[in-house]
Image (cartoon, rainbow, N blue to C red):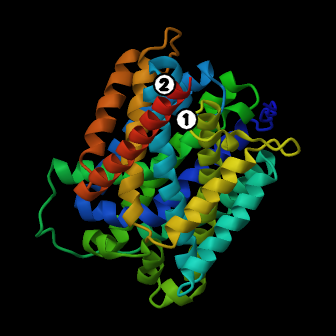
Amino acid sequence: MQQQPGLRRAMGGFDATTVGVGAMIGAGAFVIFAPAAAAAGPLLPLAVVIAGFVAYCNASATASLAVRYPSSGGTYLYGREQLGHWTGFVAGWGFVTGKLASCAAMALTFGLYAAPGAEKPAAVAAVVALTTVNLLGVTRTALATRAIVSLVVPVLAFVIVVGFSTPPARESLAGGVPGPGGVLQASALLFFAFAGYARIATMGEEVREPRRNIPAAIFGALGFTALLYLLLALSLLHALGVGALADATAPLRDVMDVAVPGEGSTGRGGAVVTLAAALASLGALLALIAGVGRTTLAMARGRDLPHVFARVSARFGVPWAADTAAAVVVIVLLLATDVLTVVGFSSFGVLLYYAIANVSAFTLTERQWYSPRWLNVVGAACCLVLAFTLPPVSVLTMLAVLAMGVAARALVLALRRRRA
């Protein structure tokens, strides 16, 4: 069998941090605040804090594992090495299926903002274009993400300032404050927006000086994005109120409309927000495609997916077969879904993935100061609690998908034993 070339360590710490930030802000800023507000009501900022704390638990576990295993694959690799092949498979399968759904959501978000009425053709075009960027090498992926982040973050900061500068929304709290279940469900949905730092770990084989750069990039990306989300949640509640935020399809654009009537959809401010939403979605999609491709590559190397997906381009040093297959699946998914339907599916898969990451980190003998064992236990428990507070249809659908993957792997292993 022909030996495939390895991936290139072409990214420094800043590029890795930028990839993580780019993966998060597209989902969090433009997709998830409305349904989270519907669940948490005025306690939305508390839900952001809870989601951020769980993300920190997971980030500390991921960083310590990435130092021990600086190769592509993320928790698929960590679970496989620390807990066994079946556990690693469940983690990898949950990540790949959940993140393929996330890719479709981000592509469709781009289409909804950039080309209303023709959103699905625009989404397909975005997937094709960004897959091409990934196939040209990881340095181009990092460069494109850096450009997108440098444009989007100032716009989000502008929206935060505008939101706080408007008179507070007048609305009654007659519906009352939601109970713990609503806040936890909102936290689980918001976790969808915090999962971008996983892209840094899944691309660990392409980061220079991984023992230093991977933890720094993960914590840097998470800290920056958590602060941005908290300020954004507070400003949206201030400007729109709970009811209008929960009902909004484009809450950031609605803030501009409240600040300057008539400005939200047609004026310069609305156009800038629309452009930022499109760019943020592209940044998230770019990083998501890269992360899914690397985990698929690792699973193919471990013989948990067809070996064809282990092929790496000798010229560009990227897993071209895995990236291309991911793009095809995403195109099929986005043609049959909408933006928010897949958020719950993705959140459940990723929360299960990180529960396994925390358990894997707990078993490490070499401990990092930022990942004590007690934090791994708290992180695993929080992930499972949040996962099962998601809407029942999301939980049941993802459990069915995971069961199908486990059954397929069991069948393949039985056939291999029979042939042997």
Q: Is residue 231 left or right of residue 126?
A: left
SS at circle 1: loop
Answer yes or no: do the residues labelled 2 and 1 have beta carbons within 8 Å? yes
Q: Looking at the rendered structure, which numbered label has been put on residue 334? A: none
Q: Which residue is mark 1?
A: 304
Given residues 103 and 413, the one toward you in this image is 413
- Front residue (pair 72, 280): 72
- Residue 243, image x and y in percent? 25, 73
Mark 2 and mark 1 lie on one chain; the one further toward the N terminus is 2
Residue 147 visible in the displayed image: no
Q: Nearer the viewer, residue 144 or 256?
A: 144
Residue that carries the numbered disc 2 in the rendered image: 85
Mark 1 Cα-neighbour bin, 10 Å: few <14, some 14–19, many ≥20 = many
Q: Is residue 56 or residue 302 the one in the foreground?
A: 302
Q: Quadrant of the C terminus?
A: top right
Q: CA distance from mark 2 to mark 1?
A: 9 Å
Task: Please determine whether, in this image, residue 210 is positioned above or below residue 94.
Answer: above
Q: Give, as a three-letter code, the residue at label 2.
A: His
- Compared with 277, 290 (above or below) is above
